[in-house]
Amino acid sequence: MNLEENTYLQDILKQPQALQAALSHFDPHPLRSLVKGLQDGSIDRIVLTGMGASLYAAYPVWLQLVKAGLPAYWLDTAELVHFARALITRKTLVWIFSQSGRSAEVVILLEQLKDIQAFLLATVNDLSSPLAVSAGECTLPIWAADERTVSTYSYLNTLAVAQLAALALVGEDVQAGWDNLSATANAIAVYLDDWRAQLQHLRDRVLLTRRMVLLGRGPSLASVYTGMLILNEASKVGAFGLEAGQFRHGPIELAGPELTALLFAGPAETRELMLRLHDELLRQDAHSLWVAPSGADQPGPQVLMPSAQGIGLPLAEIIPIQLLTVHLALENGVVPGKFLHMGKVVLHE
């Protein structure tokens, strides 16, 4: 196949421009009333919810909120609407993440919220969707063009817009976060300008073994879970993703020549723990790969990623995994990013 014409790959390559566009449009104005509500006690908790990549993009946001001392919950909308509705009261801020704004679970939740009259905040792409209409002025658009296949720039833009919004909600420096994300967009552009070399780098290092796992901690869990998702979606590879500590509680028994493990170096405070696990997996003959920028700690086999830090880290981490899905799709004999059993938006539970 002519890889340059693959829609999914073209979407991957457009991400730096899409991200800069989202940053140029970012407006914290819709958050003012919510900040006031958090300050005066009319909002006493925050529930962050979504499905798939939208939910995973909310994970670093949840960490930002809880680190600031706010009572926040992160859970998928399917569980929220059927088993955890008691979390939502009139004093709850329900922050819904959905690029389409019309997936099945989101529509059900919006119906339930009509009776509860909770506060609503939407991070969404389709401004004509039920979610955007329901949220009204409390809408944070991600300003992404329509995608026809697996989420790429809609995921990146959600990460960016939502993390900036979290900074505004907790009273931290939004401009510093904006500068960080703009620098990250530039680093991603540099990385993707040489995408053929990066793809060859992945071909040389990543084996399509019987099992594949992605591991990380903290904000890198957004990359772990979304990486797992897109390896399944775009490559038809049955990968799984875990918090690195959880991996030790059982699944480490899979370590051996049939396991490929991608370990995100992640934030500095847990780097040593990740290095220790990486070393153990190599000694157990697993194909363990360290995901980090060039020039960072390089303890053996490495997958290179764009340079980033702070809130830019989860945006940069997912880029090599996106390219990896292209490589593994070709190894698997499938068209990268082509859906076989679903559409872009899930409309039925």
Image (cartoon, rainbow, N blue to C red):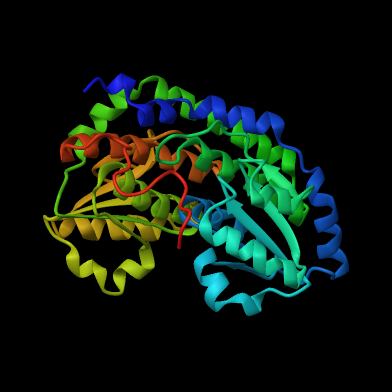
Residue visible at 73% across and 59% down? 120
Pinpoint residue 222: horizontal percent, then vertical percent: 47, 53
Looking at the image, is 57 positioned above or below residue 177? below
Task: Write down the quadrant of residue 37 in the picture.
Answer: bottom right
Q: Quadrant of the C terminus?
A: bottom left
Residue visible at 25% across and 56% down? 279
Decide if residue 33 is in sight here.
yes
Residue 139 located left or right of residue 201: right
Task: Write down the quadrant of residue 277 in the picture.
Answer: bottom left
Identify which residue, 338 or 240, lies in the foreground. 338
Q: Quadrant of the N terminus?
A: top left
Pinpoint residue 102: horizontal percent, then vertical percent: 57, 51
Q: How many marks?
A: 0
Residue 183 located left or right of residue 293: right
Residue visible at 44% across and 43% down? 344
Residue visible at 69% across and 29% down? 24
Looking at the image, is 297 positioned above or below residue 282? above
Decide if residue 69 is in sight here.
no
Residue 267 located left or right of residue 129: left
Identify which residue, 103 or 187, lies in the foreground. 103
Pinpoint residue 258: horizontal percent, then vertical percent: 12, 56
Looking at the image, is 262 positioned above or below residue 348? above
Looking at the image, is 226 positioned above or below residue 13? below
